[in-house]
Image (cartoon, helix red, strand yellow):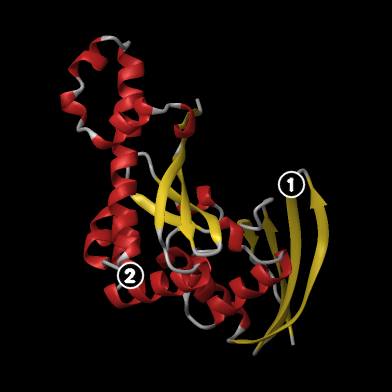
Amino acid sequence: MNRSLRLGSLGCAAAVLLSAPWHGGTAIASAQTPSAAETIRSFSQLAQRTFTFMEAFRNSNTASILPLLEPQLAKALTPQALRARIREDLTKVGALQGFSISSIDQGPGLDTVTVLLQTPTGQTVLRLLFNQTFQIVGYDLPDLTESPEQVAGDFVQALANKQALEARSLLSPFLKTEIFPQQIEQRWQALQQRTGTFRQIIRIENAGSENGITLLLVEIRFSQATDTLFISLDSDNRITNVDFPESPRTN
């Protein structure tokens, strides 16, 4: 069951929920059913972890961010790589002057906290993604997403450059709860065992959209074979599926 909290509609109650520790809310807890109380506790944890992340993000404080991450993701990141990624994203959005939580959405396997970033040019959105144990599995800047063709090309190029973290950043929120850089790298290496090493992208064809899903065909030349990856993207131009060729055409 999906559960949502729109903080803009809660006024002062939201401020109390986000700023006060839960154990101080005895009077509120006693007025809730157990399931409602559990929901509020989980919203509170998500909000508190989001504020911790955002303060660290603003200051490129990787030491505070790494413990918040899902262990496989944290293992794949060095402080230097994480700091470089954050600084790159801060360059894209502009100087971060402030932030506020807009909404918290909970669903099976994925919790999403939407944060409004205040920048010199206005507001932009950051979506912070959590698994069911409140560990961060990634974040998105949906306002900065490129075209479907650019995303598909960037994904393949990142794989070719052994940048599995960069490739993973282009996945849809739900896939980020299941797939980590290690698996992406292993799958790409397994493909190249059959095709030889990557040479170049020959062409990217947009095969059209249906029910919010866009299909891209990426034809790739390897040293021993040429074949096509089928890459599906959602309405936010995030990758929802990649079909690797099982029987590549030999050159």
With 96 as the anchor, is 150 left or right in this view? right
Marked residue nearer the N-terminal end (1 or 2): 2
Is the C-beta separation of discs 1 and 2 under 8 Å? Answer: no
Tell which residue pokes out farthest to the front in this image: 120
Give me the disc on residue 245: none
Residue 29: horizontal and vertical position, in percent? 25, 16
Q: Nearer the viewer, residue 82 or 58?
A: 58
Residue at position x 31%, y 23% from top? Answer: 38
Q: Please, what is the three-letter code of the amino acid marked with disc 1?
A: Gly
The residue that mark 2 highlights is 77
With 213 as the anchor, is 131 left or right in this view? left
Q: Is residue 246 above or below residue 215?
A: below
Residue at position x 29%, y 46% from top? Answer: 49
Residue at position x 39%, y 44% from top? Answer: 131
With 212 as the anchor, is 88 left or right in this view? left
Residue at position x 30%, y 77% from top? Answer: 80
Q: In the rendered image, is residue 231 in sight?
A: yes
Tell which residue pokes out farthest to the right in this image: 208
For residue 230, what is the image quadrant? bottom right
Q: Is residue 224 above or below residue 43?
A: below
Q: Is residue 170 above or below residue 164?
A: above
* Number of other residues with Cα within 10 Å of mark 2, as a class: few under 14, some 14 to 19, many 20 or more: some
Numbered disc 1: secondary structure: loop
Q: Please, what is the three-letter code of the amino acid marked with disc 2?
A: Leu
Q: Give the CA distance from mark 1 to mark 2.
A: 32 Å
Residue 129: horizontal and vertical position, in percent? 43, 49
Give me the disc on residue 212: 1
Q: Nearer the viewer, residue 73 or 11?
A: 11
Numbered disc 2: secondary structure: loop
Q: How many marks?
A: 2
Quadrant of the drawing holding the C terminus? bottom right
